[in-house]
């Protein structure tokens, strides 16, 4: 049975095909041969079955010829949410990650931050960041530890496995200086989730080397395996769970889940159109695969060659063109 919102009646786009997203109940929910309508405000107006298209056409007043049909090996998934990135650090992403933290701050962070008074430089860096993170919808956060000042910032990146911010708050910066590096241990995500903490993924550029949440997904899966190696009782995270962290979980962590994070009527249409078998892409599909395998392959092997289109609040922002987005 189709779900829809009668208040927004004017439909701008209708898509038919496979939609994959997370819900509170299911880490991965697959909607095969679904029909999704986006209204002129970029919000999801209805989600139904492809077989219901005649009735939905009548209810919402669009023509069958306006429906965009996804190709084989294509699916829509929610836009990936980066809950934590230092945009001002983007110019030195991927460098000097083996440096002790304070040396790194003094060599890169502080000198580069002072360059942002040059607006041309600031414009260049931020334009690149926005283009690379697929998310225009930006909410500015800071480390919560920064309330404690610089000393606690050091504490954050040196957090022990008990995540004891308080401990480091009470420890002098000097005593931490020698041991602090750009790493903070491996978070026991399973334990955090059990406590119903809202949790998403963040790239943490430039402490994290890559601005891609796909990389963060892979690191999260590998880190979880490391915890299992250390403790065979540890229940390794599944790719489905990490997919949810990267989408719905991230939107919840940022308190944006009333607007984005999955495909629900009334939310913004924030989506990636993925073609797992994109020509020239990194994935070789030897045989046809079910949608869940396609998702898993994309998360593990895919890159932007597989991301055919990106939509933010219904507007197509990838591929970039000089023309006004649809
Ligand atoms: Zn950070």
Image: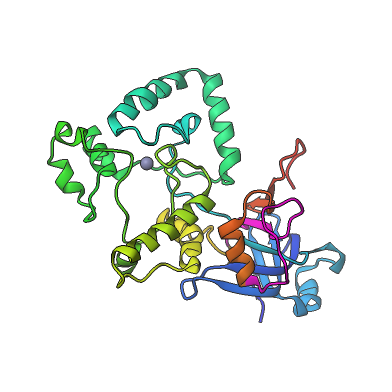
Res 130 seen here: yes
Task: Indicate which quadrant contains ligand 1.
Answer: top left
Residue 40 rendering spot, x and y as whole percentages: 71, 55
Q: Which residues are magenta?
A: 267-291
Q: Is the image coloured rainbow, by chain, by secondary structure, or in one colour? A: rainbow
Q: Nearer the viewer, residue 271 or 268?
A: 271
In the visual, does 203 lie left or right of 36?
left
Q: Quadrant of the N terminus?
A: bottom right
Residue at figure coordinates x 56%, y 20% from the top left: 120
Q: Can you say whether 26 is above or below 216 in the image?
A: below
Decide whether residue 272 is among the magenta residues: yes
In the visual, does 41 lie left or right of 86?
right
Residue at figure coordinates x 30%, y 66% from the top left: 191
Residue 197 rendering spot, x and y as whole percentages: 33, 62
Main SS, magenta residues = loop
Residue at figure coordinates x 51%, y 50% from the top left: 215
Q: Nearer the viewer, residue 212 or 118?
A: 212
Q: Nearer the viewer, residue 262 or 214?
A: 214
In the visual, does 54 lie left or right of 205?
right
Decide whether residue 248 is among the magenta residues: no
Res 265 seen here: no
Outermost residue on the bottom side: it is: 1
Q: Nearer the viewer, residue 137 or 245?
A: 245
Q: Can you say whether 146 is above or below 243 in the image?
A: above
Q: Residue 18, located in which quarter of the rendered image?
A: bottom right
Residue 157 rendering spot, x and y as whole percentages: 29, 42
Q: Can you say whether 113 is above or below 322 in the image?
A: above
């Amino acid at each position: 049975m189709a779900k829809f919102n009668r208040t927004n009646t004017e439909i701008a786009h209708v898509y038919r095909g496979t939609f994959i997203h997370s819900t509170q109940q299911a880490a991965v929910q697959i909607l095969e041969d679904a029909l999704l309508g986006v209204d002129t405000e970029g919000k999801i107006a209805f989600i139904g079955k492809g077989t219901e298209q005649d009735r939905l056409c009548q209810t919402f007043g669009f023509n069958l010829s306006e429906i965009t049909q996804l190709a084989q090996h294509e699916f829509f998934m929610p836009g990936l949410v980066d809950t934590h990135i230092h945009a001002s650090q983007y110019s030195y992403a991927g460098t000097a990650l083996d440096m002790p933290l304070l040396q790194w701050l003094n060599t890169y962070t502080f000198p580069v931050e002072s360059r942002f008074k040059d607006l041309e430089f600031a414009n260049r860096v931020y334009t690149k960041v926005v283009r690379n993170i697929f998310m225009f919808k930006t909410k500015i956060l800071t480390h919560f530890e920064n309330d404690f000042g610089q000393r606690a910032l050091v504490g954050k990146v040196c957090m022990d496995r008990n995540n004891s911010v308080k401990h480091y708050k009470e420890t002098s910066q000097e005593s931490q200086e020698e041991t602090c590096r750009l790493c903070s241990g491996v978070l026991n995500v399973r334990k955090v989730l059990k406590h119903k903490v809202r949790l998403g993924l963040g790239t943490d550029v430039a402490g994290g080397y890559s601005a891609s949440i796909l990389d963060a997904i892979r690191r999260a899966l590998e880190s979880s395996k490391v915890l299992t190696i250390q403790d065979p009782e540890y229940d390794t995270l599944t790719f489905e769970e990490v997919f949810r962290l990267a989408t719905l979980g991230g939107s919840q962590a940022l308190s944006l889940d009333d607007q984005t994070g999955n495909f629900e009527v009334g939310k913004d249409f924030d989506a990636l159109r993925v073609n797992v078998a994109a020509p020239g892409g990194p994935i070789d599909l030897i045989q046809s695969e079910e949608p869940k395998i396609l998702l898993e392959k994309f998360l593990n092997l895919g890159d932007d060659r597989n991301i055919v289109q990106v939509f933010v609040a219904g507007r197509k922002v990838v591929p970039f063109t000089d023309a006004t987005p649809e």
